[in-house]
Image (cartoon, rainbow, N blue to C red):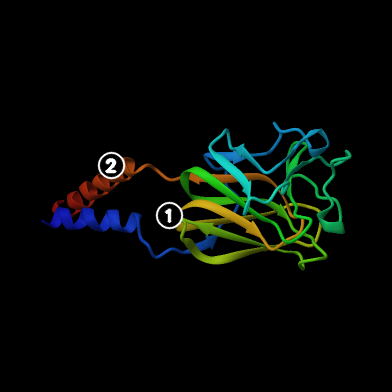
Amino acid sequence: MKRAVVFAAVVCAASSSFAQISPIGEFTGALSEGFESFPNYSSGGNYDTFDVMTGQATFAGEPSQTDQLWIYEPGTSASWGLAGNGTAQVRSGAKGLGLYNSAVAVNVRLTFDLVTDRFGGYFATADSVFGNNMTVTFFDSVGAQIGAVQNVSTTGSALVWSGWQSTTAIKSVVFGMNDAPAMDDIQAGVVPEPASLAVIGLGLTALLMRRRTG
């Protein structure tokens, strides 16, 4: 009976509905994207939707908004202007991703095929229209918002790291409230499948029982 209680506690802790989003430093995730394999927007690199992270995640404008996703390349005709407040740089390589909506603030969702517990990247948000601020909102596998809306604000053209971790698995991330933000080298950590979590739980249970009887 005690073993069952311990195991249940471990599983419940892994799937707690009390979500909390907290900032984290730079990390290299199981999933990453530097946008180097895509043409810049001068060569057709602007999209309504496109797959990233080796096909394991998808960017899409919402709701069905067109041409919000642009691959930019500094030093070419595809440099990104950050709504008139400078030309966005990149973190590595030659290219980055710019978001843009000519009518209203951007509304773009990044959806993962697998759930993740961490997400981050390098962002620039300098914007004369919306006050240099971009919102980042996290959602779980059933579409419920996780925790409070996060904010990213930069004042220059250089991309700056922002990252978050969640106590509830993340299925999608929505970027909004900015006219023309930019990003590069985005990262995500993959959460183990339920079967793997059960194995981890059993292992922790065995360790706890061994300590109690040792």
Res 8 quadrant in image: bottom left
Is residue 204 toward the left or the right of residue 69 in the image?
left
Is residue 205 toward the left or the right of residue 183 in the image?
left
Instruction: List x then y, in percent, for residue 94.
Output: 78, 36
- Which of marks 1 and 2 precedes in the sequence? 1
Distance (Cα) linking label 2 and label 1: 24 Å
Is residue 24 toward the left or the right of residue 134 in the image?
left
Residue at 70% x, 57% y is 106
Instruction: List x then y, in percent, for residue 160.
Output: 71, 54
In this rendering, the count of numbered labels is 2
Tell me if mark 2 has few (under 14), some (14-19) or many (20+) residues whose alpha carbon lies within 10 angstroms of its own. Answer: few
Residue at 28% x, 55% y is 10
Tell me if mark 1 has few (under 14), some (14-19) or many (20+) residues whose alpha carbon lies within 10 angstroms of its own. Answer: few
Three-letter code, disc 2: Val
Residue at 79% x, 60% y is 126
The residue identified by callout 2 is 199
> Which numbered circle lies on residue 195?
none
Instruction: List x then y, in percent, for residue 125.
Output: 75, 58
Give yes or no for contact between labels 2 and 1 (Cβ–Cβ under 8 Å): no
Check the picture and name the quadrant holding the N terminus: bottom left
Residue at 76% x, 64% y is 132
Give the residue at the far left of this rendering. 1
The residue identified by callout 1 is 142
